[in-house]
Amino acid sequence: MLLGTWNLENLYLPGGPSGPADKAAYETKLAALAAMITELDPALLGVQEVGDPEALRDLAQAVGGTWHIALSEHADSRGIRVGFLGRAPMEVLHDTSAFPAKLRPVQADDAGLETARTGRGLLAVLTETEAGPLRVAVAHLKSKLLSYPNGRFQPRDEGERARYGAYALYRRAAEATALRALADELLAGKGKERDVAVLGDLNDEVQAATTQILLGPPGSEIGTSGYEHPDRGDAMRLWDVAPLIPAERRYSRINSGRRELIDHVLASHHLVHRVTAAGTGLPDDETPRLPSVGTDPAERQGAPGSDHAPVWVRVG
């Protein structure tokens, strides 16, 4: 079974403010996305940046075969949301954007706007596999890409850049905390016997503080001495599979020429110890083939494919 996550980059119908300019560009984008999904052949794929639900249905049709779709009802201001494409039926367990209890609202801009909700919904589903029930949550956390008042992507000065960098970090940390609270519900203290995965575009790398929030009890990450030594924390832990990805492939986006792994798959104890392979892009490619992106997302409006590589695990 292949389980993965992929940011589809502005999957909108043609003609809209963020979508391809015309039907030809739209069909080119769909064809590029469908070719990747066809070759990966996932059992379940978490997706991000679905702008129009109909566009995801068009993508499933372009791939061919029977697909089941689950989408969050909580979209951001641009209309993008997270969801799943799966070969088996899915039951939606949670679709939420609320911060967990006791987590206060965070500041979002210079005007003092506060938010107590994630920018995009956190969606969790239950599906059946040959190995039994699988519970999976998908997320798209606050971007590191900074935007400023009046639609600007460049700050007026370095003070503004620093403040908005802090606001983005506040939000991403709060969203990671909300996602960890959802993971706690899916694990229910049974991670040693329950298959649970949390995946998506986390918009930061493996050792980032926001990513580390999701792991739970420390001391047992892949590649450390504690990984093969069970302890009481295993029931609530999640393991980021990044260390299992070959080093030369350990990136899912290229930002201003720098490779970074910002899309992640995290797995429970019962699931991670059955992972037989992990990767990015297509398994048979030497490295993912990606464009380098800059600070203005409008530069890629209507571009085919995606600026992210899928991240996946194969489970035996």
Image: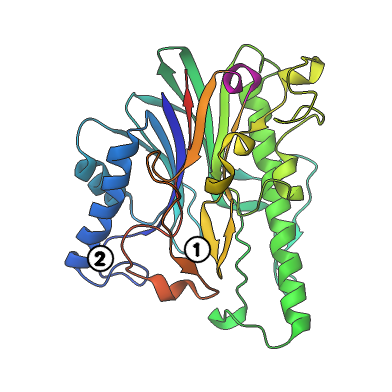
Q: What amino acid is labelled 1 in the image?
A: Ser
Q: Position of residue 297 (x, y in %)?
A: 47, 71
Q: Position of residue 56 (x, y in %)?
A: 31, 47
Residue that sits furthest to the bottom in the current view: 156
Locate residue 299 relative to residue 13 in the image: left or right. Answer: right
Instruction: Specify few, some or many for label 2: CA neighbours under 10 Å numbering under 14, 14-19, or 20 or more.
Output: some
Residue 111 can be seen in this image: no
Residue that sits furthest to the left in the current view: 24
- For the residue pair 52 and 296, the one nearer the viewer reads as 296
Examine the residues drawn in magenta and state their main secondary structure. helix
- For the residue pair 71 and 316, the one nearer the viewer reads as 316
Q: Position of residue 131 (x, y in %)?
A: 46, 12
Colour theme: rainbow
Q: State which region is magenta.
A: 268-273
**Residue with the mark numbered 1:** 77
**Which residue corresponds to the image point at 76% horizontal and 73% vertical from the top-left?**
163
